[in-house]
Image (cartoon, rainbow, N blue to C red):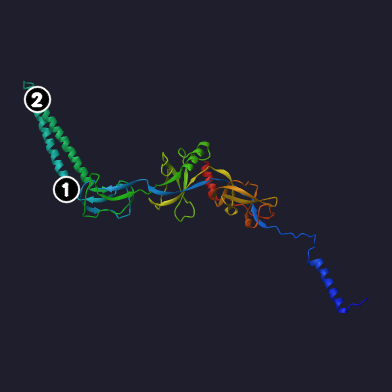
Amino acid sequence: MFFPRRPRTAAIILVAAALALYAFGFGVTRPNQTLETPKPRVVATKPTVRTIVEWDRYTGRFSAVESVQVRARVSGYLTDIHFADGQLVKEGDRLFTIDRRPFELAVSAADAERRVAESAVALARQELSRAQSLRKIGVAEEVYEQRMAALRQAEARLAATGAALDRAKLDLEFTNVRAPIAGRIDAHSVSVGNLVSGGDSNATLLTNIVSLDPIRVTFDVDQEAYLRYIRGGSDGGRPSLRDTPNSVRIALSGDADFTRSGELDFVSNQIDRDSATIRLRAIVDNKDLSLVPGLFARIELAGSGAHPAVMIPDEAISVDQASHVVFVVDRGTAERRTVTLGPIVEGLRVVRSGVGPDDFVVTSGSQNIRAGQAVAILDAAPAPVSKRAAADIGRLSR
C-alpha cells in the first residue's frame, strides 16, 4: 500500500542531499586524492673555500730577558738609597751608598805603603849601582848578588802594595752600588742604617732588577704537535721550527683578539719526561712596558702553512654520540654525513673530510629534518675573508 510522505520529511531530505553534495565538491577529500605535506624550509649554502693558516693555541708565561739580584760587594752600614721603589733605572745608575769613610782610610793607608815600597826600590837600585862600580875593582861577587836580590825583593813589595792600593780603591768604588742592567727595579730590601754584608755567597740582597723591553714568553708544546711541526718543516708544509723564524700571536687575559706578536727564538733540546712536552720561547717587543715577568698569556703558533680549506659555520654541526655530523641537501633531499673537523679559523670551522666545496650544507633548520626527506633551500651568502686572515697568509707565504 502506498503512503504519501509528509512535506516536513521531504524538506529534511533535500537539505541533507544539498549538504552532501557541498561536502563532496568542496570540503571533503575524495577517496583517491592524496594530502601533500609542505617541504621543510632550511637555510643552506655552499662551504667557504679559503686559503688559511691553522693556528695552534697554548698557554704561556712572560719572563725577563735579564734578571739581576743586586747584592752588596763590601760590608758596611747603608747610608743612602738613590731610587724610588718600582721606578725604571738605566745601567750604571747609583742605587745605594755604603759608608765610605773606612774604605777611604784603607785607600790612604794602601797608598802610603806603596810610597814606602817605592822608596825601598829606589834605595836598592842605588846600592846595586854602587856594587857594580866596586865590582870592577875587585869587590866580592857575593856582595853584588846580595844587592841584586835586595832590589828584586823591593820591587816585589812595590807590586804587592800597588795591588793592595788597587783593591782598596775597588772596595771604595763598591760602596756605590750601581744598576748592572737597565729595567724596572723592585722595592729595597734593606733600609738606611742597617749593616749589610758583602763579598761572598752570603752577601746581603738589596733589591732586584728585571729588563722589560724586549721580553720573553715561554710555553710548552705536546710531543704530537712537536712531531707535526717537524714533519711539516721537512715536507714544506710549514716553516721549519728551528731553522726558520716562526711568528707567534699573543693575547692577554680579557683580550678579544691576538693583538700582539713575537718571534720564536728558542726550542728546547729535549722532551720533558714527566709531561711529554717540549719548551718553546719567543721574543716580544714591549715598547709600552705593559708586559711584566710572570704574566700569563694565550699563545698561537702556526700549525700549518697557507693552504686551501673547506669551512662551514659551527652551528651547522651537530654531535651524534662520538661523531660530528652535518646535513647536506643533494637534489632536494636531505643527506646526513659524518665529518672530520679542524680548528675554528676566523669564525668558521675547518672541515677536513665529509663535505666538499660544491655541497649545500644546512646551516639553519637541521633540527626539523631527517635523512632522506625532501627539503626546500633558502640560500645564504658565504663568509668573506677577513683582513687579518689575509695578513697571516701573506706573512707565512713569504
* Of residues 85 and 7, the one drawn nearer to the viewer in this rendering: 7
Q: Is residue 271 above or below residue 24?
A: above
* Of residues 249 and 17, the one drawn nearer to the viewer in this rendering: 17
The disc at residue 144 is 2
In the structure shown, which secondary structural element does the residue marked by tag 2 occupy? helix
| Residue drawn at (65%, 48%) of the image | 359
Residue type at mark 1 is: Pro
Marks 2 and 1 in Cβ contact (< 8 Å): no
Q: Classify mark 2: residues with Cα within 10 Å, few (<14), some (14-19) or many (20+).
A: many
Residue 25 appears left or right of 289 = right
Q: Is residue 277 above or below residue 370?
A: above
Q: Is residue 385 visible?
A: no
Residue type at mark 2 is: Tyr
For discs 2 and 1, the disc positioned in front in the rendered view: 1
Reading the image, the residue beneath label 1 is: 102
Percent x, y for residue 146?
A: 9, 27
Q: Residue furthest right?
A: 1
Where is the N terminus found, in terms of image quarters? bottom right
The disc at residue 277 is none
Residue 36 appears left or right of 167 = right
